[in-house]
Structure formats: C-alpha cells, structure tokens
Image (cartoon, rainbow, N blue to C red):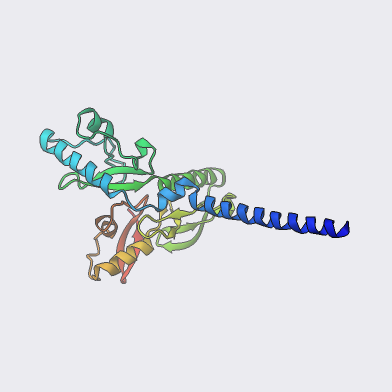
C-alpha cells in the first residue's frame, strides 16, 4: 500500500511540475505580448502612414493654398504646434482613413507638420512620453503649491535640475526615447516647468553628423528631427557648449 501511495505521489509530482512549467511558459509569453502600449512604444515608426499623410498634405496645399492643420496659439511649443487635421483631410477626400498609429484612431502618435512656412514635413510626437511628462508636471505643480519650493535634485544643466520624486512621494515613471529606445529622465527648471532630457540622444546625433563646429545659436534638436520620423517631446533647446550638448533657457 505504501508503495502504491509513493507511486501516486511521484505521478502527481510529475504532473505538478509539468503544470508549473506550462504556467511559467504562458507567463513568459504574456510578458512578450503585454502591455500593448509598451509594444506599440517600441515599434518602428509607421513610415507608410507618414508617407500617405505627407502626400495628402502636399496635394491639399497644392490645390487649396493652405495646410490642413488644427488651430494653435502663439504659446504652443514649436514641436507641438501644428497638428494634422485628419477630419478635414478625410472630409475633403484627400485621405480615406485615419492612420491606426494616430492618436485620433487609438494610436500612440500625434501627427504634426513642421517647417510649415517653407517645406512642410510630417513628423510624429510620442503621446505616451507626452502624457508622462504632463503627469510629472502636475505632481511638481501640486508640490510647489503646497511647499513653495521646487522638488529639485542635482543640477544637470544651468537652470535645469533632476526631479526629487521621493519628496513628492512618487515613483519616477519610465520614459523611453523614440530616438534610441533608451530610458531618459525628466528635468525641472527654476520656474517649475518640466522637460524631457534628450541630451544623450542629441550627443549621439552630433557624433553621427561628424561635425563639431555648430554655430552657438544652432538648436541641436534640429538634428533629432531631421534624422528621424519624430520630434522630441517637451524638450528644452540644446546648444553645443565645450563640444557637449547643453540645455539652455528658452
């Protein structure tokens, strides 16, 4: 009887081991599949959608003399200013479908037009990073209102500081750069305005350009935009100072 019991125990143990291995495998697979937002964040830029929207905008401008963009204010930052008006393009027949990558259709990007007065180009703004910076901005504003001081840490550039999340009783969110896929940090300036720090990305693009004699007034964010399908999210201006990118006050 004891021998039968031990046999049954071994059989159940083997079954349990197989079951546990199966669960681990399923969890591993689910980790690859979820969260969907993270998957979208790491996808290559939807180049076909950009080409289609660019073609629609070029045709619209050629035939109407205007750009199909939403209204903005003078205070709207440069790389947030001119959002593509998909409803207008769709209503007038220049674009049949709104791209699935577009925020308006449940995607993670806002389609923007830059260089609107010269040669309009379509670029993407990462909505996930944008929302995370807005969340941090809300935390910082609340903290300043309650404590009358900035939740700042080490100074990273003149007038720009790391954010002291511990004092705000918050966890630092993970913000991924669309240019490198690396994690980047948020900064706060003396006025309590929160920015994304693309200093590392800018340095990589400077090195890739092979130049080191950029004019002192040249905004290095231009390298990011010209060398990719994206615009930097809530980024300060960067200048080359002592051969290194430095965020400067706007």
Give how far across and how far down residue 174 sits, in percent.
49, 54
The one of 13 and 177 positioned closer to us in this rendering = 13
The one of 96 and 231 positioned closer to us in this rendering = 96
Give how far across and how far down residue 148 sits, in percent.
53, 47
Residue 81 left/right relative to 34: left
Give how far across and how far down residue 31 sits, in percent.
53, 52
Q: Quadrant of the N terminus?
A: bottom right
x 29%, y 58%: residue: 224
Would residue 236 be visible to someone looking at this image?
Answer: yes
Would residue 187 be visible to someone looking at this image?
Answer: no
Position of residue 224 relative to residue 72, above or below, is: below
Farthest residue in the top direction?
A: 91
x 41%, y 48%: residue: 40
Give how far across and how far down residue 138 sits, in percent.
49, 43
Say how many tags the image has: 0
Residue 118 left/right relative to 10: left
x 62%, y 52%: residue: 23
Position of residue 149 relative to residue 248, above or below, is: above
The one of 113 and 190 positioned closer to us in this rendering = 113
Residue 41 left/right relative to 165: left
x 53%, y 50%: residue: 30
Q: Quadrant of residue 226?
A: bottom left
């Amino acid at each position: 009887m004891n021998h039968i019991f031990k046999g049954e125990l071994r059989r159940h143990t083997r079954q349990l081991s197989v079951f546990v291995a199966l669960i681990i495998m399923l969890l591993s697979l689910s980790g690859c599949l979820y969260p969907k937002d993270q998957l979208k964040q790491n996808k290559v830029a939807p180049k076909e959608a950009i080409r289609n929207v660019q073609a629609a905008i070029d045709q619209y401008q050629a035939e109407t003399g205007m750009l199909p963009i939403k209204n903005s204010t003078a205070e709207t930052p440069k790389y947030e200013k001119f959002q593509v008006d998909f409803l207008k393009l769709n209503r007038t027949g220049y674009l049949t479908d709104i791209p699935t990558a577009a925020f308006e259709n449940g995607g993670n990007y806002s389609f923007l037009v830059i260089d609107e007065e010269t040669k309009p180009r379509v670029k993407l703004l990462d909505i996930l990073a944008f929302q995370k910076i807005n969340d941090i901005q809300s935390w910082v504003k609340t903290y300043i209102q309650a404590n009358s001081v900035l939740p700042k840490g080490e100074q990273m550039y003149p007038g720009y500081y790391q954010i002291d999340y511990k004092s705000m009783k918050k966890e630092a969110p993970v913000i991924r750069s669309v240019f490198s896929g690396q994690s980047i940090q948020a900064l706060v300036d003396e006025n309590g305005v929160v920015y994304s720090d693309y200093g590392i990305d800018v340095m990589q693009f400077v090195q890739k350009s092979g130049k080191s004699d950029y004019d002192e007034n040249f905004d290095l964010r231009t390298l990011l935009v010209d060398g990719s399908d994206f615009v930097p999210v809530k980024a300060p201006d960067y200048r080359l100072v002592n051969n290194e990118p430095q965020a400067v006050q706007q």
